[in-house]
Amino acid sequence: MELIGRSWLFFQDQVLGMQWLNTLIGNALTAMGLSMDSVMGGALRFFIYDTIKIFVLLSVLIFGISYIQSYFPPERTKRILGRFHGIGANLAAALLGTVTPFCSCSSIPIFMGFTSAGLPIGVTFSFLISSPMVDLGSLVLLMSVFGAKVAVIYVILGLAIAVIGGTLLEKLGMERYVEDFIKDAPHIEGEDQRLTPQDRLLYAKEQLVGTVKKVAPYILIGVGIGAFIHNAVPQTWVEMILGSDNPFAVILAALVGIPMYADIFGTIPIAESLLFKGAGLGTILSFMMAVTTLSLPSMIMLKKAVKPKLLTTFIVICALGIIIVGYIFNGIQSFLV
């Protein structure tokens, strides 16, 4: 058992966390005359290390997930989801969201296609909530920073928000607030495209290149903000505003995160720095969930497909779920880290 524990810690720290890379970069910068205790040296080390780590993990994850995704074209996905009913359908849609694109803006066109294909509104919204919030990338990246327990509980609670949120929207009869052009869109049934292994590898490569180009600016901005927080922002400031002693920290973090736009890869370095400075774990995770699920650009896109009442209800349900999850994590933080 002890050997398994040591092996897991090695995997988490040295493979996922790439601590060897952090040490290597620190030694290289020190040899160049920079002190790792200075603001400049520490920020540069953080920026280089996190940028390389995130892009390496990003590349491996996107390639692998895209290869898996090639087995689930829209028609096949619709048929799979059509086999489930009730809560089971919402859960299936939420689980499907874990192997789809990495940001909410990418998920909305798929959501619109599912809705026009006649899938229940609750099922499509369960997919829309889970896709950016709890994809497989979030699980691996969260493990690299916060550990396996935090990552697994985050994914479970994120799926719960997706299932409960979709179910509530369906129970409230919100399907009548979907724009008519979505409901009446012609839907052509087609055969699944038979792809060879080479086709799937090419598809995965194209998804990798396209996604990296799209998210690279947000990753660099996120790492830059993280480096600044990590090395220039006084710890007392973060503890006072976002620490566990502030009962409104979770709500504040969620409200701040909603107007922003990033994916899980861009928010991880900010979250890592905030945790180091003393912010509550639940506060950090609420911020991440809000940024990835309710970003302003994605809500503007969604507004084109649904009427204001449905959009408002969706935002309120997600925001309440995110805030509740934040308080849950803050309550159990001492048992997790």
Image (cartoon, rainbow, N blue to C red):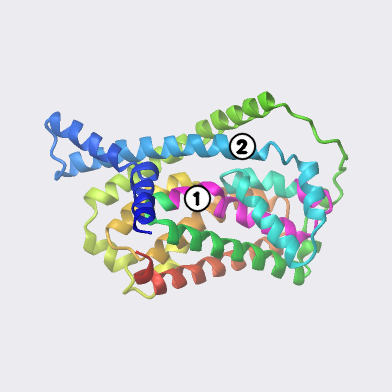
Magenta stretch holds residue 116:
yes
Q: Residues within 10 Å of mark 1 (few under 14, many from 20)?
A: many
Among the two numbered marks 1 and 2 on one chain, the one whose residue lies closer to the N terminus: 2
Q: Secondary structure at mark 2?
A: helix
Q: Residue at x 63, y 62 (%)?
A: 162
Q: Secondary structure at mark 1?
A: helix
Q: Residue at x 73, y 56 (%)?
A: 124
The quarter in which the N terminus is drawn is bottom left
Is 208 above or below relative to 153? above
Is 28 above or below relative to 335? above
Identify which residue, 305 or 266, lies in the foreground.
Answer: 266
Q: Position of residue 131 (x, y in %)?
A: 61, 51
Identify which residue, 271 or 291, lies in the foreground.
Answer: 271
User: Amino acid type of disc 2?
Assistant: Ser
Q: Quadrant of residue 109?
A: top right
User: Which numbered marker is on residue 66?
Assistant: 2
Residue ID for mark 1: 138
Identify which residue, 166 or 25, lies in the foreground.
Answer: 25
Which stretch is magenta? 113-142
Report the side of 75 relative to 237 (left or right).
Answer: right
What count of labels does the image hold? 2
Report the side of 94 relative to 144 (left or right).
Answer: right
Residue 222 appears in the figure: yes
Is 11 above or below relative to 156? above
Q: Residue at x 64, y 39 (%)?
A: 68
User: Amino acid type of disc 1?
Assistant: Ser
Q: Main secondary structure of the magenta part?
A: helix
Q: Residue at x 46, y 57 (%)?
A: 151
Q: Quadrant of residue 76?
A: top right
Report the side of 223 relative to 93 (left or right).
Answer: left
